[in-house]
Amino acid sequence: MTSVHRQDREAGGGKSRGKGVPSAATGPSTEATGDGGPRPPASTGPVLGGLPQPVKISFDQNEENTLAAAAQILVDNATVMGGVATRMVQATENISKTLSAAPALSTTERGMTLRRAGEVNTATSELWMAIAAHTDAVSYHSYEQFIEDLLCNREPGNTRETAERAARGDFDAAAANQDRELMFKRMSELRHLPGGELYELLRTATEAFLLIHAGVYPPVGARTARVLRDPAAPAVLGSDPLVGAEYDRLGTGVRVSELEAKLRAYLGNSRNNYLEAIARQGALRIDGSVASPFCENEGAFVTHPLLLELIWSYWMEEGMLTQTTAAITRRFQNVHRGGPGPDPLAELELHPLRGLSGFLWGYLRDEPQRLTVARRAYEYTHQYGLTLWGRAVPEMRAADPRPRFLEAFHNLLRQAARFYREDADTTVIADAFPVLNSLREVHLVLAEGAHNQFRDLPWTARVEMLMQQWLLARPEMREFLRGRQMVPYPEGWMGSVDAMKRLQGWGDTSVIHFRDLARFGERLLLSIRYGNWTEITSQDHAVAWLRYWKEEVQGYIHSYFTATGVNLSDDAVEVSNSADVRYIQPSFHLRNRLLASRRGGRALR
């Protein structure tokens, strides 16, 4: 190994040191001087410009041995790690072979999904199907077709239902066609049919229409099957069709005969049927004999409930149906509407060559027999606590009003809207007990008002308003009022009412929304009235009710907001009013909107 050579500071060299020469690893050492004191370390080389000259450094044998030992340790560690890696590869291959030998473990996928709770089918759903089907059966579309088939079709047998009934074997087409041909022959031989008789024929046909379609009849018949069956399924002789998806909303897959059997069982069970529970208390006498309205046996009223609600007539009246007909009949008698300016209907001229003038003559002659505005208003207050507003409405002092209905019903709709919001969130199980309590409350309020004129006045009001709709849908009326042809009205009479509202300044809310309020409100109240909610304690029934009637609940909330400006589904507290606007009479909101629209119209002029 080469040692460190140093040059003396003095020229000519000097003695070289044998011991005490520092190695590169240990650094410079201190040598003793002759007098025993420390001597400064020798310089590493000659000083050139004040800087030491660089030196050559090499390692001794001990240091090389140390490095060799460290390298050997690294080699050994690498060998150990290589062995570990080899064993890990072998273990991985063994696991792969094990999984390949077990297909169930290697191919099965595990996943988690969030979904809403399943549909709940209860015994009450059969009643709901019947309510939905029969309310459709008494709609204006069905009524208009019934009147056309009965009074306008002069070709015997050319009706919509004849082919279906004949195919099912429950209709004697030959006998029916013979009777029909005889009736049309007699009518065609009449040179002049007075207006009074025309109207009486129309009223009789309307009452017959409601007699056929307005109730729940336990026996399976052609009428029920035709209403309930799936429209996509053809009418086959002796077949038992499925109930259409429009009515079987819970997907039970029930057939018409099964539905009727379950409906009979439901109506005969006091735990489910509200009317049966009333009969069980001794309020009605029921035995096995054939029921008759002239006898003391009221069993028919229990098993054949009348599926009509007066709230349908209330919303039709708020939609200006009766006011439109009244304005037409006043002008027909040449009576001015009152107030300054000309009558908006001054140009109404109905010539005698068309039939509408005869119907209006009979309609006016029957006025003493029709319901007055005051009688309907008093019954609205008795059953629902609802009031009318207008010049024709007298000051009322009802003996038995129902002021809690509006709060209970609107609270039910608010709870239902909250349930729908929670139910749409699949991470939440919505609580239906508040809805169940609200259903019980509304049911009790409805039961309190089901007395006196409960059956007859809704029937009579429906007959009269169906005839008013038919009169307003006549071509003569549409030609005179000249409604907006491009508006897609669901029913033919609506354009005349909207046109009259614009002529008279009765507001700008379309009658379509009032029709929806009438239709949806009737279905909801019928489902609440005839279910025995006071004895139902499971929230499953409330969940099923919410799922089945979701379209009606949401549609009613939307139409009410459009007509009155009040959002029934809003949970916000109204701090600006002394009372919640949801519990104020609809007529109050409608009057305010009417006055606001009139003020806006004057401001634009």
Image (cartoon, grey):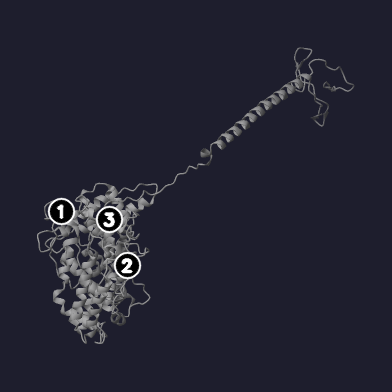
| x and y, in percent, of residue 505 in the image | 27, 76
The image quarter in which residue 58 lies: top right
Q: Position of residue 442 (x, y in %)?
A: 22, 55
Identify residue for label 3: 126
Frontmost residue, 515 versus 33: 515
Q: Earlier in the sequence, mark 1 or mark 2?
A: 2
Q: Is residue 571 visible?
A: no
* Picture coordinates of residue 8, whole percent (x, y): 85, 22
Q: Quadrant of residue 345?
A: bottom left
- Quadrant position of the N terminus in the picture: top right
Q: How busy is the neighbourhood of tag 3: few (under 14 within 10 Å), some, or many (20 plus)?
A: many
Asked if residue 442 lies left or right of residue 422, the reply is left
Q: Residue at x 20, y 71 (%)?
A: 207
Residue indicated by mark 1: 278
Give the residue pinned by disc 2: 167
Q: Nearer the viewer, mark 1 or mark 2?
A: 2
- Residue 64's tag is none
